[in-house]
Amino acid sequence: MAAETSNDGTPRGEMILCVTFYEKGQAFLRQAAAMGCRVVLLTVDKLKDADWPFDILDEFHTMPEGLTTQQITNTVTYLARSRKFERIVALDEFEMQIAAHLREHMRIPGMGLTTTAHFRDKLAMRIEAKRAGILVPDFTAVLNYDDLRAYMGSVPSPWVLKPRSEASAIGIRKLHDSEQLWRTLDELGDLQSNYLLERFVPGDIFHVDAITSERQVVFAEVNQYGKPPMQVMHEGGVFTTRSVERESEDAKALIALNGKLLPALNMVRGITHGEYIKAHEDGRYYFLEVAARVGGAFIAELVEHSRGLNLWAEWARIEICSLRGVPYVLPPQTYSYAGSVLCLARTDAPDTSSFDAPEVVYRMHKKHHAGLLVQSPDPARVAALLEEYSGRFAEMFLATAPVPLKPTN
């Protein structure tokens, strides 16, 4: 399909290729089109009938799942024979390295492979954060066995064995002694170097969702998880997160920490989702991980209801402003508070209508999921609603499922 004019009737300009293997980023696509760009979406065959904004796409292409980097490169460079892509954007974390490779191969501006590793490789991001003077839980690469023995001899258990390039809590294993580690490494075989070992630090988990423009963090919103995401994924339960009171010590400290971290990782422009822990033991803030993408689990909607801007749309605006050489300016903002409650559901389409507080502003529609957002000018009211609703969600809807070995759409 092809469109000859933008939404306001003017000729379309620059062509942007968006790549994703998951159904997300519709607001990015719409914003890019609204700004007059020609938007080409490349996804996988199984998502050909997904809820894409076909009305604004100039072109829509699919490819089989499981293609190699070279095969995807062949696909994109074939398209480029008759199209001039000005930017390539990965709408999900798992396409970031592919997009970085394509940019380098095709000499298109944007984040390259080395910087991408700072936002995909948990070992790389920890090394750079530590180098910048940011606290990180004690960690070591899973490479040299003498280093591993020395680490276990000096860092008390429990430890967590983490995949270096997975998102969320997928693939993480909690280990309590050296014998557990050696048995696990035997199972992993040649794949073990794709992991790191880290001290488990009990604490409260926060996430900072930020906008960076030309190396300056121009927006940051601090939120706090209820149960840690790793606990929810591995033990089951209801996921919650909520805005943190903006004048609190936590908010101020984490905004400063995030503002120090992103330039150290060479973030130039875009959206980031960073996670930090406030340790129960010493009250200090430790860096956990950061991704150069919009947060999952409906965090974009959470931020939109607390601050009045859509992170997907702002990401598109940043890319296009950079492309056109014009300054990016934040839109007007609101200063409310919001929180979300979400869980796997036993039924295909759970009914959340009995959750009828006037603060409910958004209900999620996703198969076998129950979820909603609440909004209030009072952060204490948001916290109270999440506490009540998470208990009711557990009773009415909660289902459990094995931790996936790889991400699912």
Image: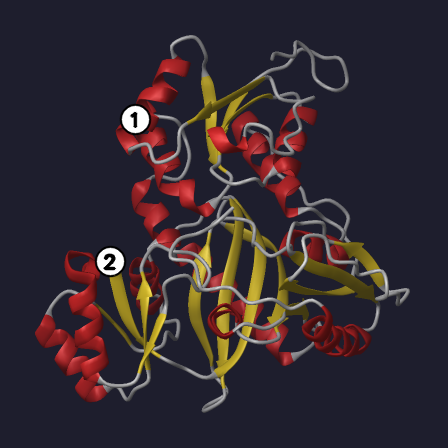
Asked whether residue 382 appears in the rendered view, the answer is yes
Q: Which residue is mark 1?
A: 71
Q: Residues within 10 Å of mark 2 (few under 14, many from 20)?
A: some
The residue shown at (88%, 67%) is 357
In screen coordinates, is 373 left or right of 120? right
The residue shown at (14%, 82%) is 150
The image position of residue 39, as x and y in percent, is 57, 23
Looking at the rendered structure, the secondary structure element under dot 2 is: helix
In screen coordinates, is 141 left or right of 102? left
In screen coordinates, is 389 left or right of 205? right
The image position of residue 16, as x and y in percent, is 52, 24
Asked whether residue 336 appears in the rendered view, the answer is no
Q: Quadrant of the N terminus?
A: top right
User: Above or below — where is 290 with respect to 267?
Assistant: below
Measured Cα–Cα span from mark 1 to mark 2: 23 Å
User: Above or below — where is 331 with respect to 177?
Assistant: above
In the picture, residue 249 is in which quadrant? bottom right
In screen coordinates, is 282 left or right of 374? left
The image position of residue 250, as x and y in percent, is 60, 77
Q: Which residue is mark 2?
A: 194
Q: Amino acid at mark 1?
A: Gln
The image position of residue 29, as x and y in percent, is 62, 31
In the picture, residue 321 is in which quadrant? top right
Q: Nearer the viewer, residue 228 or 314?
A: 228
User: Above or below — where is 253 with respect to 407?
Assistant: below
User: Above or below — where is 408 with respect to 335?
Assistant: above
Q: Earlier in the sequence, mark 1 or mark 2?
A: 1
Seen from this angle, which residue lies furthest front? 347
Q: Residues within 10 Å of mark 1 (few under 14, many from 20)?
A: few
Q: Amino acid at mark 2?
A: Asn
